[in-house]
Image (cartoon, helix red, strand yellow):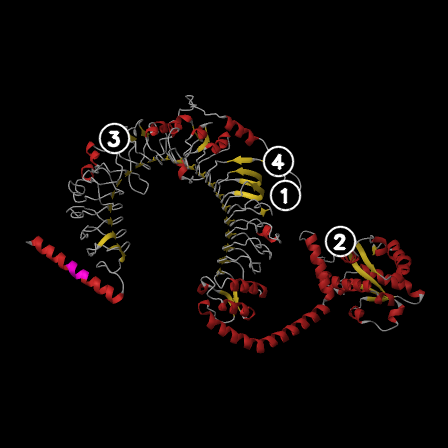
Amino acid sequence: MFSRRVVYIELFTSILLSSSISKEINSKGKVKCSSEGRCKCRPEGKFYKAFCSELALQEIPQFSENVNWIDLSKNKIYLIERIPQNIVVLNLTANCIESLQGHPFDGLTKLKILKLDYNNGINYTEHNFYQGIFESLKSLEELDIKNSPASIEKWEFPSVAISELASLKVLKINGLPDMTFPTFFRTLKKLQYLDISGRTGSFCSLRHVSNTFFENLPGLRHIDISYCHIRYIEKGVFNKHSNLSFLDISNNREMGFTVLQNVTDSFNMTNITTFKFDSITCTTGVGTMLSHCHLQNLYNTSITEFSSSFNRLEQFQQGVLRSLPKSIKTLTLKLNRLTPGKYLYEFSQLSGLEVLDISQQFGGLTYPTAWADPCKENVDFSLENGCTGTILYSQKFETLLYNMDRLNYMKHDSLIESKPYITFFLPPKMNEVLMHSSHLYGKVRMFGIHAENLKKIHLYDNGLLDWEGSVLGTENITYLDISSNYCHRVTSYFFSHLHSLITLNLSNNILGLSFADDNEGNIFQSQGKLEILNISNNHIEYLPFKFFKHTVQMRSLIIQNNKLSDFHLQLNQMRNLKFLGLANNRISSLSHASMESFERLLDERQNSVTIDISGNVFTCVCQSLKFLKWIALHKHTFKNLANYKCVESDVPFQFSKIDDSIEKLTKYCLSYLSIYLPTTIALTLIICILVGVGVYKNKWTLRYIIYKTKKKFRNGGNLIDNIQSTFHYQYDAYISYCGSDRTFVLSEMYPRLENCCGLKLLIRDKVFLPGESKSTCIMEGLQESCKAVCVVSKRYLSSKWRDFELNMAKVEGIKDRGSIRFVILILMPDVYNGIFPSKVVDLLKQDCFLEYPENERDYGEFWENLIRRISQNIYDS
């Protein structure tokens, strides 16, 4: 009686819910398919898909009966209830379900996919996986019950419960120690996909796989036993699996290559197409080699995908590669330690190879975890036992080796003389090569490749510092990524043979200087088909006007994260341009010529171009008003315009309200022009006049300071100020005179002061060397002398060089010696009998002069006074 009431209540609730759904559709035009309004419902035929992921739900909401697809992943649901009978897909991944008691799946006869993974409370016990729990799931094709247990001590493989799923095709389950697939699993005749990997954070610990482990699952096509801590796999484990096409034994690090013989023992009796054995060796250790013993069981198979990554692989035994199945289309050898060897020549023999991934060589180790790795792999004795296998030689291969070893000569159009180059032969069907992040280093010189179908090359994140080239045989390549190589130079002919390029990524290099020198656009002269070019982050400060003139098919041009302050380039030829990325440069505003160039571009494309100039240093001031008005005129062209910001602005400026902001700025600028601009000009003129007067008045002091500064830097920053009077000078007096007084100095002054009194005089006609700077000699002479004696005559006062000597002597005395008495004037009769000029008045006031007498009887007293003045300390009063 109670159960009938429950049925009636649920039926009534369903009717009410259907009624509310109808009303919701009519009133709001939106579909509501559950009692939880946050669920998104999508119609599909006469049913609905309900998306209720990540809503923090603790209970399953009520769904209408026309819902057949439910996603309730990443919630906090702890109990399975109220599931519609028409459900086909039920996703309960990452919830808090702990118990499956009460037959929660009864009546779900149409359910095809059931995901219960990452419900860590669903332990593998009889309490959860009891007989009959899946009895109603007659149509279930995929079951995922992987979890991460806190402890597996009480876990048991739920073989009885799973054996009820006769229609099961895909099984994803934890791998338990000592687990087996019992004989009654033969009833699962449709089971083809078995995933017991611990890859996704779940648990798998098989350790030992016997040759009968998969015996009762003969129909398997896909087996994933990666990340299962397997150390050993017995021979013949796949003998009865003729339909096997996919096998992944990766990340069982203690197996080592020696187990490969057992694993591949019966591969020639299967339909194996994909074989992955990545990371089956320890992280650290000496380099490994794949030998014939390891792979000889693959030679007669039809494998199309072969992967051996992160295995410390360094070499292939000679003949191994060319003995591999010609059916291999994808060969993955990344994260190894491949070093050059003759095996490189053998790649060309893989006639079916389309994709070669040898990226990330010498990478993948994490410090310090890898250094303290306790891993101990099985010892490989194959090479020590003389395992050579059958080496398949051919006359064709011997010819190939000869061609690879010899240098070919070809005269390049852009080179003055012939240069030798080597040609690398690649498989004829090769269309993609991945060699990124592999520590390739050095200059890219001229070489050739022979691969007619090669389309894509990934060479980013290496150390190819100088692109000289060119690379021959690359006419069919459409995609090239050589970003992040720290390259600082590219020649104008490096890309000359890449005629078919559509996508080119040169970002994260240092090519700014090479680009700036390419005034005629020769670097990309052969790229007439180029559609996508990325040269971001290249330290670009300037690009020549014709730099892109040959790239007529350009659709997306990315030049962001550089140092461009303007962008005036020829773009009219880019008739298909859709996107121009100039974000994060140094553009404060664009020049008139740049805006005109953009204007023509936008007019021709009918404003269909999107321009991104975000992250630049915009100045929203009066000087950039024209630029801001131009942006406002084409505001729908600029990407994320509302997020643009000003680093400097005269008024509060918001690009999100650019029209209003420009109106405010315009008003401000009008007042600025009528009031502030004349005031600024007047102040500028006054300041200039004052500065000019100050400079003129202090011109000799400034010249002196400039000389002293230069001398300081010539002497490595050491400059001794001669302030103390006790300092030892090389000369007692520096004699300044004009040419007409040379006789007086040499015949009168020199004999009386130097020969008779022992004073050492610096007389330019005796000391200065021809060819040296006259001003430098004068300055050095003044600084090396205790006093400066100036023989002042009318000719002296009219000489520009003597004017220089006199003023420099005065500045030397005031600035360096601390007293103007450093200077002694000898006034000749033709001067003191007239009017004294202003240039010597300050010295006369300080009594820094002597008058040369007209009478011979007064000569003795004059010379005594001069000698006393020269010998006297300048600080004595």
Q: Are marks 3 and 2 in contact (CB under 8 Å)?
A: no
The residue indicated by pointer 1 is 413
Q: Which residues are magenta?
A: 13-18
Query: Which one is closest to the eye, mark 3 or mark 2?
Result: 3
For the residue labelled by badge 3, is the local secondary structure a helix, a strand or a loop? loop
Q: Residues within 10 Å of mark 3 (few under 14, many from 20)?
A: many
Q: Residues within 10 Å of mark 2 (few under 14, many from 20)?
A: few
For the residue labelled by badge 4, is the local secondary structure a helix, a strand or a loop? strand
Tell me the tag on residue 728. Answer: 2
Q: Position of residue 833 (x, y in %)?
A: 88, 72
Q: Are marks 3 and 4 in contact (CB under 8 Å)?
A: no
Query: Which one is closest to the eye, mark 1 or mark 2?
Result: 1
Q: CA distance from mark 3 to mark 1?
A: 66 Å
Return the residue found at the far top. 385
The quadrant of the image that shows the N terminus is: bottom left
Q: Does residue 115 appear in the picture of this structure?
A: no
Q: Relative to residue 290, is residue 666 drawn left or right?
A: right
Q: Earlier in the sequence, mark 1 or mark 2?
A: 1
What secondary structure is the magenta-colored segment mainly?
helix
Relative to the observer, which residue lies in front, 163 or 255? 163
For the residue labelled by badge 2, is the local secondary structure a helix, a strand or a loop? loop
Q: Earlier in the sequence, mark 4 or mark 2?
A: 4
The image shows residue 473, relative to residue 525, as above or below, that is: above
Q: Are marks 3 and 1 in contact (CB under 8 Å)?
A: no
Q: Amino acid at mark 3?
A: Glu
Q: Relative to residue 480, is residue 803 drawn left or right?
A: right
Q: CA distance from mark 4 to mark 2?
A: 74 Å
Q: Residues within 10 Å of mark 4 (few under 14, many from 20)?
A: few
Q: Amino acid at mark 1?
A: Asp
The residue indicated by pointer 3 is 215
Q: Earlier in the sequence, mark 3 or mark 2?
A: 3
